[in-house]
Image: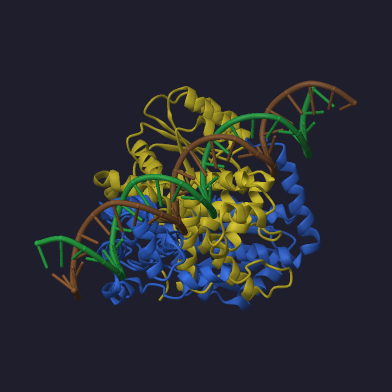
Chain colours: A yellow, B blue, C green, D brown
Amino acid sequence: MTQDVKESFGGPAGSLAAKVRTLAPSMTRSMQRVAEAVAADPAGCAALTVTGLAALTGTSEATVVRTARLLGYPGYRDLRLALAGLAAQQQSGRAPAITTDIAVDDPIADVVTKLAYEEQQTLADTAAGLDTAQLDAAVTALASARRTDVYGIGASGLVAQDLTQKLLRIGLIAHAHSDPHLAVTNAVQLRSGDVAIAITHSGSTGDVIEPLRTAFEHGATTVAVTGRPDSAVTQYADLVLTTSTSRETELRPAAMSSRTSQLLVVDCLFVGVAQRTYETAAPALAASYEALAHRHRSASR
Amino acid sequence: MTQDVKESFGGPAGSLAAKVRTLAPSMTRSMQRVAEAVAADPAGCAALTVTGLAALTGTSEATVVRTARLLGYPGYRDLRLALAGLAAQQQSGRAPAITTDIAVDDPIADVVTKLAYEEQQTLADTAAGLDTAQLDAAVTALASARRTDVYGIGASGLVAQDLTQKLLRIGLIAHAHSDPHLAVTNAVQLRSGDVAIAITHSGSTGDVIEPLRTAFEHGATTVAVTGRPDSAVTQYADLVLTTSTSRETELRPAAMSSRTSQLLVVDCLFVGVAQRTYETAAPALAASYEALAHRHRSASR
DNA sequence: CACCGAACCGAAAATATCTTTCATCCGTGA
DNA sequence: TCACGGATGAAAGATATTTTCGGTTCGGTG
């Protein structure tokens, strides 16, 4: 009992706004209205009963409860408690966010500040929203995998390559695939004990889902790194690692923050695996460092 | 109504234990038991219903409600909300800045926290250290460039590709090069009005310096994105954008934070250029978004 | 020592709040 | 246009909270 509650407002502390953004796409219109109200004014909503909040958002009690469920609470009662906690926290806490929308005529200095702030926010949200149990399971699978394939396209393709590079550096066998045909061709080779990772923000990139599905059907452990935990890709994923989504604006495409978020997840995977395989990883890292040294001219000064 | 609640858990925030002590003398025996339980474990009590708390303290619901009233709340419901707030507060209060070194035996949850924290730190440092004048000049050069070449190897190669992808999306002509020979071959084509960007953390990666030098000698505007503003690469750079370096540890190679830093710089360049070329950039972004839409299966709900 | 009154206390009724069910409605795709 | 499936809210049902009310205890008193 006690643990349940700790879970419900201890875990994702402060990440409510992030969760709302992450789940918003999978919400119906009315639920979005409720979620929005809650994210906009946690303190105010904490003061309201189901009926009150339903009236405020022009919806029904049922919808409010449904929204609470979607946000991960057993019911409205628990959401309300979490809200009260949040309110107290941010009241005692730090300076709240100013507007971070980037305008066309913002001076470059503002752009730097705002981008940095947004990305920091994204990192915090992602860290708060990551399911460590799933992450741990993914690390375990990776550490003992015979081989690992990583699928990603477009911006996510770069993240896939980043992960692959890192895993290679600690002596694991990993490949990144951007070509869907080659990816599927290779996925056929996978079997139980191997790992396949799909990286896709939308979760609905067919070119990435297909190879993951193939890997899944061949018995490999499949992992999805996505911002949409309810999307198509998770259908074939044994493990799902959720990245956070932040508001995108015209000048700041979603790809930007999803990349930051994905990279953090990837880093966590890497460090986790390096821990597990420390005996071999540490010397391997040192060796790759040594091997690169001669490619660098001695720095001036 | 709303005001009442704000008053009730905004006002005496945190002083609950003190209030219990103050009021204890005027309490009856059963009420003291309740008050004591509440003061001892706010979080735990927040998880309980009236009935639960009554059972825990061996009293009745009525007594719990009376106690809540005595403590200044309209009823138990509000006391419970306040308790939740208190719990959240004291949970967030503790343990902000421990060591951020990642140890081999750190649980995965700590790894996530520490990595996120480190990367946030890196972002803040980078933003603070960026020379906006240089950045502005680089943006200006990019916005009017006939073509742009970007050089990067290894982890920096991914950053180079990231920048290239972005510039292409807003209609600019950009290429990323990881192959030093091809890079030099292409650099020969550059001339005044073109831009060459070298991305290297150490600033001493020969394979990246060479093409930049060639571009420099052919009259292109050259930009270096490096963590070492006094290194070899800056010799051939008209503009230098400094990325930040944070401590690296055995399990956290420098590549990790330099990448974060480089990506922020690259994002700033991109947004800056998008601002300058808004008339063409906005439609281009929208168009590329549209073009990709059909590659995504409609998301499940 | 028996009695009285007052305050304390908790069982249970009354009320408020939350949850579930179900019929209706709306948008969507054939 | 029609049929379908999901979204929605009204209202019934379940819980939680508050109130009521009578029993109990305790200290004082004759």
Is residue A258 visible in the rendered structure shown here? no
Q: Quadrant of the C terminus of chain B?
A: top right
Residue A289: x and y in percent read 35, 54
Quarter of the image containing the N terminus of chain B? Answer: bottom right
* Image vertical order of residue A34 relative to residue A157, above or below: below
Above or below, D29 relative to B220 = below
Residue A38 spot, x, y in % from top left = 58, 57
- Depicted B9 relative to depicted B171: above or below: below
Tell me which residue sits at (54%, 44%) in the image: A70
> Based on the displayed image, in which of its 4 quarters is residue B204 positioned?
bottom left
The answer, for residue A29, to whether it is visible in the render is yes
Q: Can you tell which quarter of the image residue B241 is in?
A: bottom right
Comparing A44 with A184, the one in front is A44
The residue depicted at 69 percent of the width and 61 percent of the height is A251
Please tell me which residue lies in front, B27 or A14: B27
Q: How many marks?
A: 0
The answer to whether residue B140 is left or right of residue A222 is right
Residue situated in front as seen by the camera: A11 or B103: A11
Instruction: Decide which of B229, C6 is in the foreground and name it.
Output: C6
User: Percent position (x, y) of residue B242?
Assistant: 52, 71
Q: Is residue A60 above or below residue B257?
A: above
Residue A142 % position (x, y) = 37, 38
Drawn side of residue A132 relative to residue A29, left or right = left
Q: Residue at x 44, y 58 (%)?
A: A13
